[in-house]
Structures are given as structure tokens and as C-alpha cells.
Image: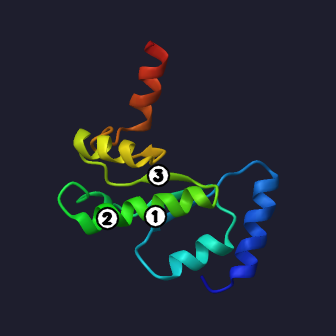
Amino acid sequence: MANLSSVTEFIKQLKEQGCLFALDDFGSGMSSFAYLKNLSVDFLKIDGMFVKDILDDPIDFEMVKSINEIGHVMGKKTIAEFVENKAILKKLEEIGVDYAQGYGIGMPKPIASVLLAEIEV
């Protein structure tokens, strides 16, 4: 991000209008921590490269757990990306991750079919 102060001001103005913000792919670069500290985001999206192997890789498990804890200490809600099955979802629940997204939750769908399903309910 070339101009952090401009981005910070932009986020502030949009938050005054009711917008919420997420910091995406958290953990994939060292600058992520600087962004987390300096940007007023509401959600912290944990990078899927850590999430997808938390059942088999103790380092990935600890990374996800630590990122989740840091997010919560800073008052952010956390979102795990790349949740591919119910076992990963259960482990994330045990850790205390707030939200999950991925094929284990639901496959991407055309907007029209989602809206049609809502009308039929």
C-alpha cells in the first residue's frame, strides 16, 4: 500500500457512512501486521494457506490459533478462508474463529439462484 495515510482517511470516511472493512489474506506477508495495526478494519480474514492444513500441520494450527487470538485482542472478528470440510470447521470452532468460508460451507452459486431460493422459502 503506497499511501497508508490516504487509505486510513478513506476507510474512516466510509466507516462514518456505515461501511465495514476486512483485512484479507492475513498472514501471507509481513506487512499484514503493519496493516492490522494501522488500518481500522472490522474483520481479519485468516489466509487459507494456513487454514487448509490445520488438521495435519501443527505449525499451521498454531498460526491460525495465534492470528485468531491477535485479532480478538484487537477487537476484530475473524474469518477463516479455505474451509474445505466439516473437520476443519469443527477445529476452527474449537479455536474460537468467528466466521468461516469455503467449499466445506457451501459452493459458490450464481446470485440469481441464491435469490430464487430465498423467494421460495
Q: Is residue 18 left or right of residue 44?
A: right
- Whether residue 32 is visible: yes
Q: Secondary structure at mark 2?
A: helix
Cβ–Cβ under 8 Å for marks 2 and 1:
yes
Looking at the image, is mark 1 or mark 3 earlier in the sequence? 1
Is 118 placed left or right of 41 in the picture?
left
Which mark, by number, is residue 76? none
Q: Residue at x 27, y 69 (%)?
A: 59
Residue at the outermost left position = 56
Tell me the quarter of the picture where residue 94 sits: top left
Residue at numbered disc 1? 67
What's the distance in space between the residues labelled 1 and 3, CA to CA? 10 Å
Q: Earlier in the sequence, mark 3 or mark 2?
A: 2
- Secondary structure beneath label 1: helix
In the image, which disc is placed on residue 79?
A: 3
Secondary structure state at the residue bearing disc 3: strand
Which of discs 1 and 3 lies nearer the camera? The answer is 1
Amino acid on which the number 2 mark rests in the picture: Phe
**Where's the N terminus, which quadrant?**
bottom right
Residue at 39% in and 49% down: 95
